[in-house]
Amino acid sequence: MRSTRRKQAGEIANWVDKGAAFSGASVLLFLAVLLVSAAAPEKHLAIYSTAANYSLPVLQRQGQDYVGLLELLDPLGTVSAKSDPPRWRLHYNNILAEFTAGKSRARIQGRDTDLAGRFLMENGRGLVPLASLNSLLPRFLGGPATLREESNRLFIGNIATHFTASVSPDDPSRLIFRFTAPVNPSVASEPGKLRLTFRREPLTAPASPMLTFSSRIIPSADYSENNGAAEIEVTTAIPLLANFSPDGRTITLAPAKSQTATKAPAVNGNGTPAANIPVAAPAPSSAQSSLATSAAPPASAPRRYFAIVDASHGGNDRGEALSATLAEKDITVAFARRLRQELESRGITTLVLRDSDANLPLDDRAYFANTTHAAVYISLHAASNGHGVRVYTALLPYTGEDDRGPFRSWITAQSSSISLSQAAAASVAAELRKLQVTVRTLSAPLRPLNNIVTAAIAVEVAPPASDLSPLTAPDYQQLIAGAVANGIVAIRGQLGAAP
Ligand SMILES: [Zn+2]
């Protein structure tokens, strides 16, 4: 029990550190990339790993894309190469690889490997086809490597930064991006657009590349990937400033005029999460646009949400296969959006944690929920078995330890709020019963409920009968979401009063 907890706490610390650490080398590479790209759009490969995020030039040879293998492996381990034309031998940690110029097969640890093209040697430098990396790298690294060939982005291991974007419920001119790890994009603008470019971050696409918002001022944002970078382009009717939170996990876009004027240098991409670096996006009508900063906004106070709605599963985790075509992860997002609507219409500010088809680990969900200091956390699940709704609260593991010190244990973080969670579950269940919905309240070791410090419930929605179709029907979703929202409203005073 103890070691499990240590491990979980360690994983979170590691995850936090990882995001914050940009190596000096990657910053230099990044600056070099910037300088070069100003002259001509050269091709680059961006590499994201737990060890470092960096970028390498992509070389065009014989109509194919190539990359230097030694340079690629260098930041990841101990590597050396010996050239003895036409042979080229490479040592990576304890692995020996032998290449021959002009040959499309190599030997790694005595085993033959196909390179998807010829190996090239230039001045003692070994070049491999970009297309070979998916099969070649796991042989060296002992783990998965995923090359997104269309955008020249290489993900080593299970590494990704996800984001959500939402317009502030009480100010349609503020767009808030939240990231699962610190980011430091460069910001540029043109009339009607503000563009965030992420070169060093393993930023990963939302479910749909086109994000739309219910705001006429900021109607949409577009996600794209190209040439070793990810980009978010925001369409805006008025000039916006980008304001970075000190921890680099939140970027708020807000109108320039609402900010107080303080001069600040328009420097970005310096490797540290840049706080308060504003760049104005001129309005579509303005003929002259200036990239220079006009005013620096004050440090944005983190927005407080009363409720966090978490659409369970997502990305590779499809949840329950409700039918041949219906995945739980899709139902939970639809329910989450509806529940947000219902809560917001009752005056409860709500953040949906997973508003896209993203992989979001349970630890990240709990971390997000805890750092927003919301009054209540509602996780949503869907099921094909059973009828109606099950409302869960955490079943806390017994640790036999006094957990009231200044540091709460991760696995029993919920302990001080469990009675409030049970009150919330009872209130939601009572509202559902009023609508003749079959409902049960249960305690279960359902993660991440036990990791949430505030009141936390999970709502699992099953169809009223064995027919699945109501799960996707707007009126059934509306009925359930409305009742859950009423249940939260009924005890909002109690929830809001919690420390
Ligand atoms: Zn589920």
Image (spheres, rainbow, N blue to C red):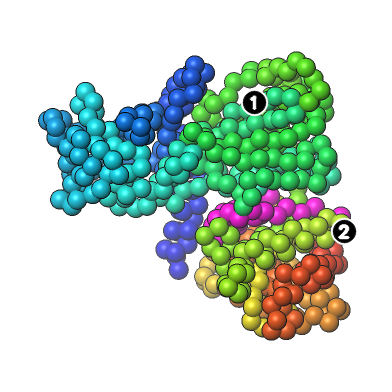
Q: Residues within 10 Å of mark 1 (few under 14, many from 20)?
A: some
Using the rendered image of the protein, determine whether residue 26 is visible from the camera's viewpoint. no
> In terms of secondary structure, where does tag 1 sit?
strand
- Is residue 361 within the magenta segment? yes
Give the residue number, with chain letter if any, for mark 2: 346
> In terms of secondary structure, where does tag 2 sit?
loop
Seen as rendered, the residue at the extreme front is: 63
Q: Hey, what amino acid is under mark 2?
A: Arg
Give the residue number, with chain letter if any, for mark 1: 188
What range of the chain is rendered magenta?
347-372
Q: Residue at x 34, y 53 (%)?
A: 143
Q: Residue at x 18, y 52 (%)?
A: 111
Q: Looking at this view, is 357 or 164 the one in front?
A: 357
Left-right relation of 221 to 48: right
- Is residue 108 within the magenta segment? no
Left-right relation of 349 to 85: right
Name the spot of residue 337 as percent of width and height, x first.
Answer: 74, 58
The quadrant of the picture occupied by the N terminus is bottom left
Q: Looking at this view, is 356 or 481 the one in front?
A: 356
What distance separates the C-alpha of mark 1 from that of mark 2? 37 Å
Left-right relation of 377 to 411: right
Depicted 444 relative to depicted 220: above or below: below
How many discs mark residues in the rendered view?
Answer: 2
Q: Residue at x 83, y 39 (%)?
A: 216
Between circles 1 and 2, the one closer to the viewer is: 1
Q: Quadrant of residue 233?
A: top right
Q: Hey, what amino acid is under mark 1?
A: Ala
Name the spot of residue 139 as percent of width and height, x first.
Answer: 27, 50
Q: Looking at this view, is 316 or 411 the one in front?
A: 316
Residue 375, disc: none
Q: Quadrant of residue 238?
A: top right
Q: Residues within 10 Å of mark 2 (few under 14, many from 20)?
A: some
